Amino acid sequence: MSGVRPFPALVVRPEWARRLVSGLAELPEDTGTLPPVAPPDPTAYDEAAAAVYVYRQGDHVGIVGEVEVAAFTDGRARGHEAVQAQRVESLVKHMETDAAPALVALLHDAGPTYAETVAAVCATEPLLDFAGPGALRQQVWRCGGDQGAALAEELGRAVLYIADGHHRVAAAVASWRAAGEPGDAGVLCVVHAMDGLRLSAFQRRLLGPVDQAGLMALLELGFVVRPAASVTAPATGSFGLYAVGQWYDVTPREPGAGLDVEILQAQVLDRVPQRLEIAPARTPLDELTRRCDSDGGVLFTLAPPPLSALTRLADAGGVMPPKTTYFEPKPCAGIFRRP
């Protein structure tokens, strides 16, 4: 059992939604300077009895519920990325003042109750329906009583995989242990079907100036480097490379030796002195190549790893480097608050 359960929530009122709901910004977490959270007007949220919630962003649907913190430590809910200690420490402090935390996004192999409940609930009038950050439609339905309990029970029998929120989970676990591991502690999560989110990769840019000749010599040791006429979408088992105004296809000489990001990290990035800039795939390539042209840096583009590779890694207790996968859409913050 993964410990998924209904939870008592304060849900933002429709007339307040556009003012209080925000997109999940990663920059504050990266800098470690998350500010204290000011409490909103208490009339901005409606209180409801314990339930789970169907949450749809555009065409992407998930179930919002509470997952036992202990599930993230005993293997019932599994991650695949390493975390950075500074970010975890910053989030621990931030979460002490934030009653409207960003939801952790999870994946699972959806069962029949999940599919039937989502279809039935989404055919009814939503509790909340508004244009959220980026004009992406946000809809919420409350699912309580026997229907919500049955859905939570089925989710609780599934193995859950972290899609987005490894650092928030690590911070919740740290706070839970500091408090003596209380049994009722939980993490607010949105649980999607295994194919319920879009998966892309983070790009890696070495800040310049880079010794271009030295980098090419290093690459030649373990990779086949071929000039490309223009930018191409990288495929699993290869990288794109932009250096000195030219695109290249880079393929390991020994394919299958590991995930692409692990090969790139071990054989290239760990062996050069330059600082690394990590950008999600949604960052325009024109902007990243412009930065390379400006400072003499280089850019590596990667394909997202197969989802099956992530679940196998998580099942085996392994982790990839931080900022390896990018799942979208990210759940918004501010829709749900704890009483």
Image: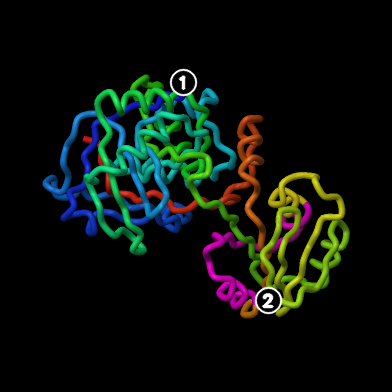
Task: Please state if 97 lies on the left or on the right of 61 as rendered.
Answer: left
Residue 296: give its label: 2
Reading the image, the residue beneath label 1 is 1
Distance in Å between CA atoms under marks 1 and 2? 52 Å
Residue 135: give its label: none
Q: Residue at x 47, y 30 (%)?
A: 111
Residue at disc 1, secondary structure: loop
Q: Nearer the viewer, residue 62 or 312?
A: 62
Callout 1–callout 2 Cβ contact below 8 Å: no
* Amino acid at circle 1: Met
Q: Where's residue 241, x and y in %?
A: 72, 67
Specify whether residue 177 is in view.
no
* Lower sequence index among marks 1 and 2: 1
Quarter of the image for residue 209 reads: bottom right
Task: Please state if 238 lies on the left or on the right of 129 as rendered.
Answer: right
Q: Where's residue 139, x and y in %?
A: 29, 49
Q: Nearer the viewer, residue 168 or 234?
A: 234
From which residue to which does the magenta span run?
267-292
Q: Where's residue 7, x and y in %?
A: 28, 30
Which residue ends up furthest to the left in the rendered image? 43
Specify whether residue 40 is in view.
yes
Task: Please state if 172 lies on the left or on the right of 208 as rendered.
Answer: left
Relative to 208, say whether 83 is above or below: above
Q: How is the image coloured?
A: rainbow
Tell us which disc is closer to us: 1 or 2.
1
Q: Residue at x 64, y 43 (%)?
A: 320
Q: Is residue 281 magenta?
A: yes
Look at the image and tell me in which quarter the C terminus lies: top left
Residue at disc 2, secondary structure: loop
Q: Where's residue 10, x and y in %?
A: 21, 39
Q: Residue at x 46, y 24 (%)?
A: 2
* Amino acid at circle 2: Gly
